[in-house]
Image: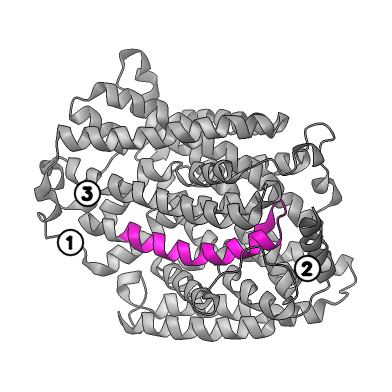
């Protein structure tokens, strides 16, 4: 990777973060959140931003400590060994690989409402928010496009990305302003059963399932690209926190404008009946802002394609990282001698993207799955941070998170609560998707003659029990979150918070000086000596 090493400054890293965060999330998130929570969706975005900030801060210290490509997959491995390392890596990889698919689906859903005569054929791409066979074909072409953009080079990607990101920032701004002046109905915020028509529990569910967690997911990109940062100590925390705050600000404004721009007649029966295939473009056409609709249709390709291309780059690095951890065959750890990209890993990702495309077929459905898988992978960050402060106290920390003893457990509790808000049975389904990965782990352990398996497994047993408890509470929890209402609203969250703190403490205590420490120390020292 030497030909592209340490090239990205703080600005480029922050742009990568914003570029990854602002993908299809803004094109659909405001509509989906309003559908779930009504005008109170504005609070959902703020809560989501706070949750992600707390989690991201833990990763900022880890990313600066170990500036390596695909780092998010490695930290739990250093702190707790291979079993938890694998679980976290698998959940993270599923959440990010499926994001590439969701971006392609988003472009096709916007394309399906093209208003022009010559584009009549596009109307048959989507039926009731689910892609038709034609739609699947076009989404497949987009996946191949993202793949080839990254297949040849990383530098081209870095140059194009800053340009795409600036475009992605301008369009939501222009759109928010135009919709605001063209038709803003202040009454929408209080009409139709008030500001929170479906109760405050719906505000929390919107955080987990309307694509809000999913929309902020991109903060990982600067962390995963830490290996290419010029000065990680400065750029990683700035890029991570900066990209979350800037994107959060944009998302809140978009949500406010969206709620105000909806024609009051459309919400007579309540916000939950609001149905769009391409939310903002439909609003623009309804307000006769045809030029704005055209800009949005262009952006519906550019925004998701920028994110899809970014993630195609980062997922291949994650698989590369998983191979280096010993969970995948050697071929996935090979880099192309000229372009420095892990091509076999990219091909595997492409195959997985197609599986997600044919299984889920709609933006809303897939965004829910991604959000929950993402939360499960995030949960390890705060635990790894605190554990490594004990087991690797002598390592150099270019960025030392102040107040970590409060921020890390809070991050863990917030992530656990958001996981619970995702509602039963979705919580159980996604944990099942994550369990599918375990046979792969056991296969490699058996191949390794179960060498050191017991120690690694015991270090990670808390995670299995934690997921089991989360599913159980989700099942017996409040009916407001899809449960059996044995544990009522309010108490359910108290129980989750206490449980989460217990598991956090157990997780930190379970951390061991793993056999991967030598490798971790080498990466840590190598960077300081540069």
Helix, strand or loop under label 3: helix
User: Mark 2 Cα within 10 Å, few/some/many (few <14, many 20+)?
Assistant: some
Q: Earlier in the sequence, mark 2 or mark 3?
A: 3
Residue denoted by label 3: 273
User: What sort of colour scheme is used for the picture?
Assistant: one colour
Q: Residue furthest right?
A: 449
Decide: is 141 above or below 17. above
Residue denoted by label 1: 197
Decide: is 344 above or below 272. above
The part of the image, by quadrant, that contains residue 483 is bottom left
120 in magenta? no
Identify the magenta region.
44-72
What main secondary structure does the magenta stretch of the protein show? helix
Residue denoted by label 2: 442
User: Mark 3 Cα within 10 Å, few/some/many (few <14, many 20+)?
Assistant: few
Decide: is 96 above or below 146. below
| Distance Cα–Cα, label 2 vs label 1 | 48 Å
Q: Earlier in the sequence, mark 2 or mark 1?
A: 1
Helix, strand or loop under label 1: loop
- Residue 279 percent coordinates (x, y): 30, 38
- In the rendered picture of this protein, how many numbered marks are placed on residues? 3
- Residue 127 percent coordinates (x, y): 37, 36
The disc at residue 137 is none
């Amino acid at each position: 990777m030497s030909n592209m090493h340490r090239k990205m400054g703080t600005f480029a890293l922050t742009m990568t973060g914003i570029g990854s965060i602002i993908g299809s999330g803004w094109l659909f998130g405001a509509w989906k959140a309003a559908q779930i929570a009504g005008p109170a969706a504005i609070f959902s975005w703020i809560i989501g931003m706070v949750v992600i900030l707390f989690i991201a801060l833990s990763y900022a210290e880890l990313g600066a400590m170990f500036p390596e490509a695909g780092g998010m997959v490695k930290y739990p491995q250093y702190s707790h060994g291979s079993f938890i390392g694998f679980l976290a890596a698998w959940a993270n990889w599923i959440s990010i690989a499926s994001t590439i698919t969701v971006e392609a689906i988003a472009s096709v859903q916007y394309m399906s409402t093209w208003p022009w005569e010559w584009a009549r054929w596009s109307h048959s791409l989507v039926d009731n928010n689910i892609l038709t066979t034609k739609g699947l074909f076009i989404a497949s072409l987009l996946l191949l496009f993202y793949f080839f953009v990254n297949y040849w080079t990383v530098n081209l990607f870095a140059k194009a990305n800053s340009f795409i990101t600036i475009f992605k920032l301008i369009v939501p701004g222009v759109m928010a302003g135009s919709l605001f002046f063209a038709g803003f109905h202040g009454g929408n915020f209080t009409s139709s059963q008030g500001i929170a028509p479906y109760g405050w529990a719906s505000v929390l569910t919107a955080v987990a399932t309307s694509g809000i967690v999913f929309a902020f997911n991109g903060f990982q990109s600067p962390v995963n690209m830490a290996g290419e940062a010029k000065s990680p100590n400065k750029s990683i925390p700035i890029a991570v926190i900066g990209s979350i705050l800037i994107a959060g600000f944009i998302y809140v404004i978009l949500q406010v404008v969206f709620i105000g721009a909806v024609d009051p007649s459309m919400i007579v029966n309540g916000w939950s009946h609001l149905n769009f295939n391409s939310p903002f473009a439909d609003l623009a056409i309804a307000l006769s802002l045809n030029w704005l609709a055209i800009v949005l249709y262009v952006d519906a390709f550019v925004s998701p394609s920028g994110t899809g291309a970014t993630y195609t780059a980062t997922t291949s690095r994650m698989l590369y990282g998983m191979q280096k951890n010993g969970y995948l065959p050697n071929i996935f750890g090979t880099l192309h001698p000229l372009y420095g990209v892990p091509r076999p890993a990219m091909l595997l990702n492409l195959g997985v993207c197609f599986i997600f495309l044919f299984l889920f077929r709609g933006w809303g459905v897939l965004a829910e799955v991604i959000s929950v898988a993402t939360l499960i992978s995030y949960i390890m960050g705060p635990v790894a941070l605190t554990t490594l402060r004990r087991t690797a106290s002598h390592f150099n920390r270019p960025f030392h998170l102040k107040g970590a003893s409060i921020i890390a457990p809070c991050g863990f509790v917030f992530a656990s609560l958001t996981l619970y808000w995702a509602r039963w049975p979705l919580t159980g389904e996604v944990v099942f998707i994550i369990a599918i990965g375990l046979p792969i782990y056991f296969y490699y352990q058996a191949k390794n003659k179960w060498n050191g398996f017991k120690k690694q497994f015991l270090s990670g047993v808390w995670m299995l029990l934690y997921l089991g408890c989360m599913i159980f509470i989700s099942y017996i929890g409040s009916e407001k979150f899809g449960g059996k209402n044995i544990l009522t609203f309010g108490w359910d969250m108290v129980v989750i918070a206490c449980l989460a703190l217990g598991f956090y403490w157990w997780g930190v205590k379970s951390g061991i000086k793993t056999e991967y420490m030598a490798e971790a120390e080498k990466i840590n020292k190598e960077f300081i000596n540069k």
